Amino acid sequence: MLRKLPYGLICLLLLCSLTATGQTRAINEHSKNDRLQSSSGKRVNGSGLRTTTYDGVHHLLGLHVDGGYSKMFGNMPNILNRPGGYTVGLGFDYSYTGRGLILQTGLAVRWQDVSNRVFNDSLVVDPITDSEGTPFRLQYDLTNRVDMSRNLYLQVPVLAGTYFYGAYFLAGVKLNVQLMGNTKTKLNVTTTATYDRYIGPWEEMDNHGIRKEVEEVRNGGKLNLKFDVLATAEIGYEWSLGNYGKKGYRKQSAKDYRVRLGAFVECGLLDIMPKGDNRSYVIPEKSRYDFSTFEFNHMFSTSEATKYHVRNFFTGLRLTFFFYGKQSTEKCILCGPLGDEIKMR
């Protein structure tokens, strides 16, 4: 029968058959390289599944650094919640990501340097006699007072959240324990004398101990702040570095590096007011004109403060770098029997 067919038609049929066979082999070879993955997680010929950063389940290890604004706010009637101060933090993070979920924990330290303004206070000592035996009233005015507190905390976060094309959101709690710290009190002291026999107060007589707006600074020990639990939230964006996560085929040697930049806020849920027994200030009777002998203590360390509450607050920006990532083994659901027959090492 072939003898009856034209020679040109026979050549055309042979060419079509060879072309179809070559296309079938190419598709099979491409399927092996593009869709198969071994149980060890390696890809054929250094390439593998067409993947992005958020395919499958990932386990990430990283470090973060943050900084921003902080304050202690409470309800003591004679102390203001401002101006506050700054905070910086450094920590180690473990993050699980997969199926739209982020679970994260770790260990961190946080430094806090905050200030609270204190309302002006006055003390009148009456009666007092001067060197000539004349009675008068001696008044102390304590103005422009600022109580400063510096604290180092250890923090353990327990967070959960989600992600969407690089954007992420985390929320949860942080256990917060004070490790160390110190305090400082800064204020101006003014003394005036008032005599019944004279009109108006006597001021700025340094040789008699009557002085105006003398700045005094006192350093003190740490505030013994109580254990705290912080409610925390973070929102930001994540970038993948290197080959991993780009649209295309992941190279076998590619590392799962990531960088996050986000804004965070943390607010104390518990009252951390210390159980102090100090007095706000002590003026010795025997050295009432020598300001250097006066004692000043942070308001939160006084016995009066125990009747009130105070809480912590932090907010700022956080930069996180994940230096190690491991993706759980993925299973090819399109390979069929062919994938089971190929042994990869």
Image (tube, helix red, strand yellow):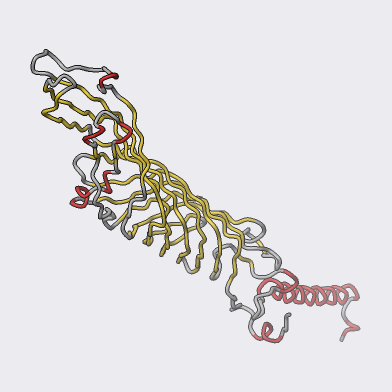
**Who is closer to the viewer here, 2 or 325?**
325
331 left or right, relative to 343: left
**Is 121 located above or below residue 339 in the figure?**
above
Quadrant housing the C terminus? bottom right
**Who is closer to the viewer here, 5 or 44?**
44
Q: Which residue lies at the image location 34% right of the left edge and 57% below the top edge?
A: 231
Q: Going by the picture, which residue comes out furthest to the left?
A: 196
**Who is closer to the viewer here, 210 or 141?**
210
Q: Residue 183 in the image: x percent, y percent? A: 36, 44
Q: Residue 60 in the image: x percent, y percent? A: 55, 65
114 left or right, relative to 57: left
Q: How many marks?
A: 0
Q: To which quarter of the image does residue 133 belong?
A: top left
**Is 68 located above or below residue 19 in the figure?**
above
Quadrant housing the N terminus? bottom right
**Is 269 located above or below residue 139 in the figure?**
below
Q: Residue 206 in the image: x percent, y percent? A: 29, 19
266 left or right, relative to 320: left
**Is 15 located above or below residue 151 in the figure?**
below
**Who is closer to the viewer here, 285 or 188?**
285
Q: To which quarter of the image does residue 271 belong?
A: bottom left
